[in-house]
Structure formats: C-alpha cells, structure tokens
Image (cartoon, rainbow, N blue to C red):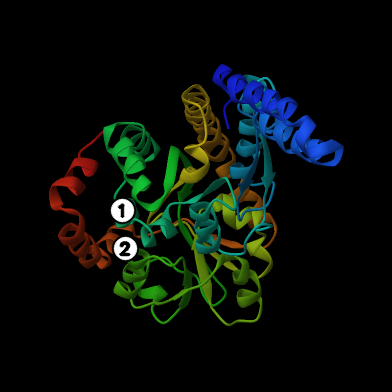
Amino acid sequence: MLYSGRDVVPCRIMIEGVTAMTKRIGIVGLACLMVLGLGACTGGADKAGKGEFRAQLKLASLTPMGHTYNQAAARFADLVKERSNGRIQVTVYPDGQLGKGERELLESAQQGTIDIYVGSTGPIGGFNPSIGILDIPFLFHDYGHVDGVLDGPVGQRLLDDLEKAQFKALAFWENGFRNLTNSRRAVRGPDDAKGLKIRTMENKVHMAAWQAVGANPVPMAWGEVYMALQQKVIDGQENPVAVIHAARINEVQQYLSLTQHVYSPAVLIVSLKKWQTMPAQDQEMLRKTAREVALYQRKLGRDMEEKQVAELAEKGMKVERNIDKAAWRSAMQPVIGQAAAQFGKDRIDAILESR
C-alpha cells in the first residue's frame, strides 16, 4: 500500500470523533476505538515504509547454487538491493527448495506464492504455447544468432506475450545448447539413439523431436531425474553442459554426446501479481537490472562450457564430439514441419534468417 498525504484527513476526523464520544462511552470503549483508529491511520504507512515500496522477494530455481542461474541470481539480488537502497531484497532459493519440478514452480509464480522464477523456457510452453517456437530443433546457428534474436523485437514480443499466463518476463537468460547423455552406448548419429528412454521436459516439441529419431521420450520433473538415471528407470537425459556438470550427471551416465540439437533459453519471470503491486520506477529498475545481468549470465556459461566438458571427461564420461549434425537435422525435419504449421512458417523463417 502506498502512503498519500490524503490519508491524514480521515485519521484526524477519526481521532476527533473519538474525542467527541468520550463522555458517552467511557474509558474502555475509548481505548478500543483508539486502538482501532490509530491502527487504521498508521498501519498502511508502516507497511509501506512511509511512502516507499518495500518487498522481500523469493527467487526460485531448480538448479544447484553453482549453476549460472543462481550465480547470476545472486548478482541480481545484490544489484536490486543496492539500486533500491535496501527497500527491495531478493533471497535466492536454488536446487528445488521451493518446488521439485518446473511446473510446480511456474504454478507458484502464477499464484504469487513465489515472486521470481528463473529456468528454461521449455516447460513454459504448457502455460503459453507461443514460447514453444524457441524449442524447434536446429533453429539457431550459434550464440551470436541467439543474441540477435532474443535481444531484438522477436524476443521482446515473446516476453510480452507471457503476460497472458500471469507471468511478467523481464529478460532472456540462458540455459544453452542441449546435449544427450546416456548409460548404454556412444551416440553419434540419430540411429544410435533408437530405443533409448530419454528424459525430457514436459514439452511437446522436445518429445516429438526424440520420437522422430526413434527414441522414447519420458517427461519427468527434474527433481526425480538423478535417481531415475541411477536406478536405470531411464537410459538418458538431455541438457546443456552447465546443467550436466552442476547436477553431477557423470556419476550416473557414461556417455556424453555434444549434439546441440536444441538451443534452450532461460527466462527471468516475476509473478504478475507481485509485479502489479510495484511502482513504475521499481518495475523499470528490475527490468533493466534483469537485462544487464542476462549478459553476465550468458557470458559466464559460455566461458565455462569447454572447461566443464573437460572436467566431465576427467571424471570418466566418454565425450563424443564427432556428431553428424546433418543427419540429426534431417531426422528431426518432420518436427520442424509440424512447428511451421503451429507457429507459422514466416515466423520461423524470420528467426532462421536473422543473423
């Protein structure tokens, strides 16, 4: 609640009214009215901090604290605290502390029980289908292509569209190009993936892509994946190198194939319910800070990627770099065709041709 000078008038009237009633109601009644009256006068101002918006915000992710999401989230929290002079404080809850699955956290953000979410856009397609265009296999050529699209008009339209799902999306962060791990065999081309049970996010485009190459996609909450791999309930999973490294997938998977079959953006989302309580100047500060930290987060992940691959190899993973990307692209072509029917060929071409 924001404090206004107009709030003083009803308070004065209330106190004067209490004074006028003193002779009629006695001390006990007066005391009760004074408590209620002063509470009404001062409660809003105290809550608002004498006219200033104040908030303690919970930022949730599913990844371990060492992941770039949370390193960047900590930086975001520091900058927000500094730029708001301590009025807005963000506490980071990594590693699924506030929910074990992507859908659970996103639903909590919709409901306003968590304030900020950072994670892959993959599961968001279940809440707003338009974002699913980014999940098309082999849509992006390289990181430069990614930045040009996501930081431009196409990316802004996608962020704005998420308001329909009660999300205020501030900026695209980065999950990275997704790669396959499994416990059964080396995978170079799509034929090598046939028959493998692969954990995916709850995402129709991702699932269709794996079905197209003859694998068996198994949608599963991230919090359940490590144990499922350990117990051989599933054969493999697919994620960017940073996630594979941070989650110690090398402990339960022998093979890493650098397929880079899908680029996976991340997004920093504020609950629309919380967003609508904020003054415009604080909204703009959060938006600018989120975009500034996005550049830091992307660079952090990209700079670390090759080092993390080397560390996974040192810990026993067999890394396959000799990937037949032309064969993968050809095998997943039917999914690209289906996506064109859903999202519009012109929109897909606009991304493919944006360099």
Residue 353 horizontal side relative to residue 169, left or right: left
Q: Which quadrant, please, contains the C terminus? A: top left
How far apart, in angstroms, are the residues tagged by discs 2 and 1?
A: 9 Å
Residue 73, quarter of the rendered image: top right
Residue 26, quarter of the rendered image: top right
The residue lying toward the viewer, choosing from 88 and 102, is: 88
- The nearer-to-camera label among 2 and 1 is 1
Q: Position of residue 271 (x, y in %)?
A: 50, 46
Are the residues at dot 2 and dot 1 in contact (C-beta closer than 8 Å)? Answer: yes
User: Residue at the spot x=68%, y=32% of the render?
Assistant: 47
Q: Amino acid at mark 1?
A: Phe
Q: Position of residue 215 (x, y in %)?
A: 39, 77
The residue lying toward the viewer, choosing from 112 and 13, is: 13
Q: Position of residue 267 (x, y in %)?
A: 46, 44
Q: Position of residue 37 (x, y in %)?
A: 70, 33
Q: Is residue 247 above or below residue 118?
A: below
Q: Residues within 10 Å of mark 2 (few under 14, many from 20)?
A: many
Q: Residues within 10 Å of mark 1 (few under 14, many from 20)?
A: many
* Mark sitting earlier along the chain (2/1): 1
Q: Is residue 88 visible?
A: no
Question: Which residue is denoted by mark 1 in the rendering?
Answer: 138
Secondary structure under badge 2?
helix
Q: Which quadrant, please, contains the N terminus? A: top right
Question: Which residue is denoted by mark 2 in the rendering?
Answer: 328
Which labelled disc corresponds to residue 265? none
